[in-house]
Image: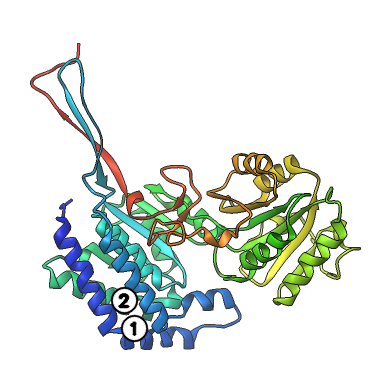
Amino acid sequence: MLLIDTDKKNAVLNSMVKYLDSDREEIIAANKKDLDAFDRDDQALYDRLVVNDAKVDDMIRAVKEVLAQEDPVGQVISKGTLDNGLNITNKTAPFGTIMIIYESRPDVTIEAAVLAFKANNKILLKGGKEAHHSNEALVECWHKALADNGLDKDWIQYLKMDRATTQEFLRNPDQPLDLIVPRGGERLIEFVKQHAKCAVLVSGRGNNFAYVAPDADMEKVIPVLVNAKTDKISGCNALDKILVDRNHPQLDDVLLKIEGALKEKGVHIVAGEEVLDTLSATDKIENDEVWYEEFLAMKAVISTVDGLDNAISFINKYSGGHSNIILTENTDDAMKFMEGVDSAAVYHNASTRFTDGGQMGVGAELAISTDKLHHRGPLGLKQLVTNKYYVFGSGQVRK
């Protein structure tokens, strides 16, 4: 693969900033076509689909952030000379071609492409059919920016495929494919894993939990839970399940305060069997599958759990491995929870809504990885490279 020098890559990004600004009316008009055709029954998906002036400004900001970051390609990881005289340097290198499959969010067309391109990867963008007009307008901006700088538009490709065509492409891609990142629910992830012939890096579901310990400070608990649940219900970092320790000295009072604060914000409460007599909620958990479910809605489960160890086990069984919280004033318990819960991000007395590249200081992100290889958490610019060993010799042979 051609290695593009940093100045040229940055020139493309500068051109992209220009086109996002100059073409914003066309981008928003294209998005309106998608919005007009969309069924608003799925509010979370609709929210993700919207592109307005503020969203275009966010896209421009994302490109500028990556523009300002150091080129991640060719960075020396380690270097040394062995006893036999071999000089070995391990350096960062592009993956090659990355495919991302995503629904509804046109801003991914900007963030994924800017990160992949700056890391010298080609990217194949497989957006959802509900955002076709928006994505095509944004990819047109990319193609103009590439052309302005003498680069082929194949660096950033938009794949307009239905499910059957996508399945066939995964099985028999018409070009080298090195990494696939599916951003979506369990069905999408399983679909990609079943059919892909290359590495798949999972950007998993949310279904995030909060554990409220017996010593939790309610002055922190309420604002954290309300923010985590209601700040953005369409985010994979939104809260879905709340477990209050049944050993809490004011258990009933705490349960009612949490329920009241969430209901005041319009959250529909589903109660665990053991708290039905305490809460005003009449909906209860009907089956075990509810514990696995990511809601992406103004909906939350409130239940109880017996102690820290059981909370850790319960969360590890049911959560999506994305972001989970402990609310406690005991730092030892907090650390035990954070070390024991198996997720990309663990929080002590803070909202899960911070699991985001920009909020965590990474900048623009391709996705939040819930995989353990090759990276877990926000996939920023530095995470979109692999590595390569350069071995310099003078005729050495292995004996």
- Contact (CB < 8 A) between labels 1 and 2? yes
Q: Nearer the viewer, residue 284 or 38?
A: 284
Q: Nearer the viewer, residue 229 or 45?
A: 229
| Label 2: few (<14), some (14–19) or many (≥20) C-alpha neighbours in 10 Å | many
Q: Which mark is residue 204?
A: none
Q: Amino acid at mark 1?
A: Ile
| Outermost right residue | 277
Mark 1 and mark 2: Cα distance apart in space: 7 Å
Q: Which mark is residue 27?
A: 1
Residue 255 quadrant: bottom right
Q: Position of residue 306 (x, y in %)?
A: 81, 45
Q: Position of residue 220 (x, y in %)?
A: 68, 60
| Outermost top residue | 399
Q: Amino acid at mark 2?
A: Leu
Instruction: Indicate the secondary structure of the residue bearing disc 2.
Output: helix
* Residue 374 seen by the camera: yes
Instruction: Indicate the secondary structure of the residue bearing disc 1.
Output: helix
Q: Is residue 386 left or right of residue 53?
A: left
- For image coordinates 76% across by 69% down, the residue present is 269
| Outermost left residue | 394
Instruction: List the residue tagged with mark 2.
Output: 138
